[in-house]
Image: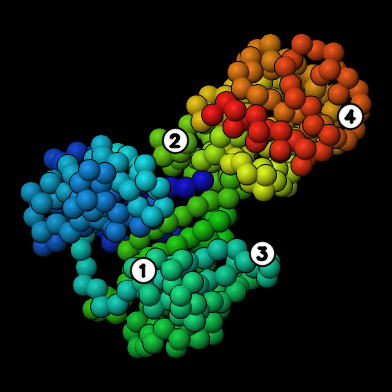
Amino acid sequence: MKIHEYQGKELFRQAGVPVLEGIVARSGDEAAAAYEKLGGAIAVVKAQIHAGGRGKGNVIDNPNQKGVVLAKSADEARAAAEGLLGKKLVTIQTGPEGQTVNQVFVEAGCDIARELYLGIVLDRAAAKPVLMVSTEGGMEIEKVAEETPELIHKAHFDPAVGLEAFQVRKLCKKLGITGNAAKAAMRFMPAMCRFYVDYDCELAEINPLVITGDDQMIALDAKITFDNNALFRHKELLELRDLGEEEPSEVRASNAGLSYVKLEGNIGCLVNGAGLAMSTMDIIKYCGGQPANFLDVGGGANAEQVTEAFRILLSDPNVKGVLVNIFGGIARCTTIAGALIEASKTVGFTVPLVVRLEGTEVEEGRKMLAESDVDIISAVDITDAAKKIVAAAAEVA
């Protein structure tokens, strides 16, 4: 689950991570009032969307309107907000369609001496969280990692212990941080690592992390993603979820207990198991097709879930065919076959449907489908299924 910058900064504040004062605004007048209330000579008006790269992004049909704007008066803050609110902002992470800006964050300015990068993720190979820092603050970290990976410095830490003092000292030396700024880092970096662990984050990123003229370390950004599987421990975080920032079909799938990610292709995939979903998408692409989604109904799929899965798949106008690839284990093939039959009656299949069943009670499941009036194309294995659905979808297109 992702949250907005202003929400992340409030959590940072509660965790002892220094941030600047800021006010959320949802109109030009509110942005102007926020500027006046902050009381400084400058403020920054930031679009609030679940995507990075806002500073270099621009509004569709208005390339001069950036997602982060420096304001030196209340009128400038109002104009910046009005140029963003209700508009679609395109960044390197939104795709060409952009995301609608529904609110802006008006934040006080500060005296920036240096810009750094800080991010924390889980290193699965090491089975530990890893803190990453770089001198290249404000830059696209993916580009830095690709072109100058030596500028990214890492420190793995035990989640039960946190980041230790000697690790902070080593990172400061690599970043060229000394004196009072190094003392600030001794507080800031361990606090961020505690935050990452305490809130079960998948990602905690600050870009840029700034050192001010008086050697303070401040989070000038907050990009946070929480582990959905751990949200039962943090029910208060659910109140921060902004459904308007999420793909509606993905929200609908989540509510039905399905794992769904919308993609750009034209072949819908319905499978039971994340690994099977990934291999199904791979073989579709290998055979010349393009997956329209990742949809995993799970090992315990029932008729209601399969029916809802088809509703979601067929609601996408780009879907020209559906491949059902099931390996019967916990969910037997007969259960899936019955669910397909029920779904056909409830939803109605309007595009070609290729079905490949394998596993427990597969013969019985195939017999059920063969004796039903469901219009399907049977496949004997995954390669056969992929070839058939790519061909069938091409005919519809």
Residue linked to disc 1: 139
Q: Nearer the viewer, residue 6 or 143?
A: 143
User: Are the residues tagged 2 and 3 within 8 Å (C-beta)?
Assistant: no
The circle on residue 243 is 2
Q: Percent position (x, y) of residue 46?
A: 26, 52
- Please report whichever mark, 1 or 3, sits nearer to the chain's N-terminal start: 3
Reading the chain from its start, which is encountered first: label 4 or label 2?
2
User: With 231 as the anchor, is 387 left or right in this view?
Assistant: right
* CA separation in Å, label 1 and label 3: 25 Å
Position of residue 105 measured from the top left corner of the image (x, y, whole percent): 27, 50
Q: Amino acid at mark 2?
A: Leu
Q: Position of residue 47 (x, y in %)?
A: 28, 49
Choose the circle earlier in sequence order: 1 or 4.
1
- CA gap, disc 2 to disc 1? 29 Å
User: Who's the residue at 90% across and 33% down the image?
Assistant: 360
Q: Amino acid at mark 4?
A: Val
Residue placed under numbered mark 4 in the picture: 362
Question: Residue at point 35% right, 88% down?
Answer: 179
Tell me, for residue 124, which label it has, or none.
3
Q: What is the secondary structure assignment of the residue under circle 2?
A: helix
Judge by depth and name the residue closer to the eye, 123 or 18. Answer: 123
